Amino acid sequence: MVFHVPPESGEKMSLCVSVLLAYAVYLTSINSFLPSVSDHVALYSIYLNCMFVLKALTVVASAFVLHLHSALPKSTIRKQLTKFLSANPNKVTPDASSTGNPDEANDLNDASVKPDMKAEEVKLVLGQEQWFDIVKKVDLLFFCAFLLLFILSTCGFFCAIAFRQE
């Protein structure tokens, strides 16, 4: 769920840490009900520990996405991710910036580009919007990866219960 919170809202990390702390409290309360001395570790305890580790990894992934969101325009990670994840790395044509006419830019339909803007301002605005789209793609990539990990670990947990030998 945390991957659907936009980075500019400022609530992404607080939601992440709150859910991680909720997992920790829940894990502590469940472990107090489980037997302390046993020949085998309870599968439910293993599952909760796996979910806690998965949630801790989502905190790290969210911190990485927030770092990307605030990356400087000249940073190397921004250039590399723009090259690999951008559908069109050159949104503003060189002719539009050389003539100074912002009407020749490719994406003037956007609300943030105003007709009275200079070509350099248009290029900066479009580059920033392109970068936010790339950060959203990275966020979606993390969402899909963690959803897959969650589904696989939950299916593994239920398979372990179903095929458990006593």
Image (tube, rainbow, N blue to C red):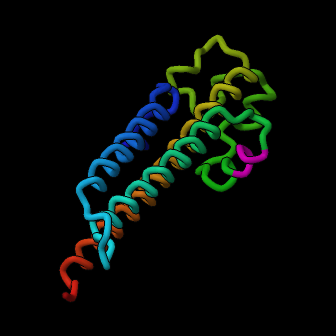
Q: In which quarter of the image is the C terminus?
A: bottom left
> Where is 147 relative to 89, above or below?
below
Instruction: Residue at 30%, 56% (x, y): give it.
Output: 31
Q: Where is residue 129 in the image (x, y as percent from the top left)?
A: 58, 32
Q: Give the range drawn in magenta.
A: 76-80
Quadrant location of residue 68?
top right
* Depicted 145 relative to depicted 80: above or below: below
Q: In this view, does 49 lie to the left or right of 159?
A: right
Which picture quadrant has residue 130?
top right
Q: Taking 12 as reference, is 136 above or below it?
A: below
Expressed as whole percent of the image width and height from the top left, the position of residue 149 reads: 40, 64
Relative horizontal placement of residue 141, taking residue 118 as reference (left or right): left
The residue shown at (24%, 78%) is 159
Which residue is drawn at the image coordinates 64% and 38% (left, top)? 67
Between residues 90 and 61, which one lies in front from this camera angle?
Answer: 61
**Looking at the picture, how far across and down is residue 38, in whole percent?**
30, 73
**Dominant secondary structure, magenta:** helix
Residue 38, placed above or below residue 64:
below
Relative to residue 143, is residue 38 drawn left or right? left
**How far across and how far down the image is residue 19, in percent?**
38, 40
Residue 74's image quarter? Answer: top right
Check the image and name the residue furthest to the front. 37
Residue 46 versus residue 123: which sits nearer the camera? 46
Q: Which of 108 and 160 is in front in this view?
A: 160
The image quadrant where one finds the N terminus is top left
Q: Is residue 151 visible?
A: no
Question: Is residue 34 on the magenta stretch?
Answer: no
Residue 70 appears in the figure: yes
User: Residue at horizontal 65%, vertical 32%?
Assistant: 70
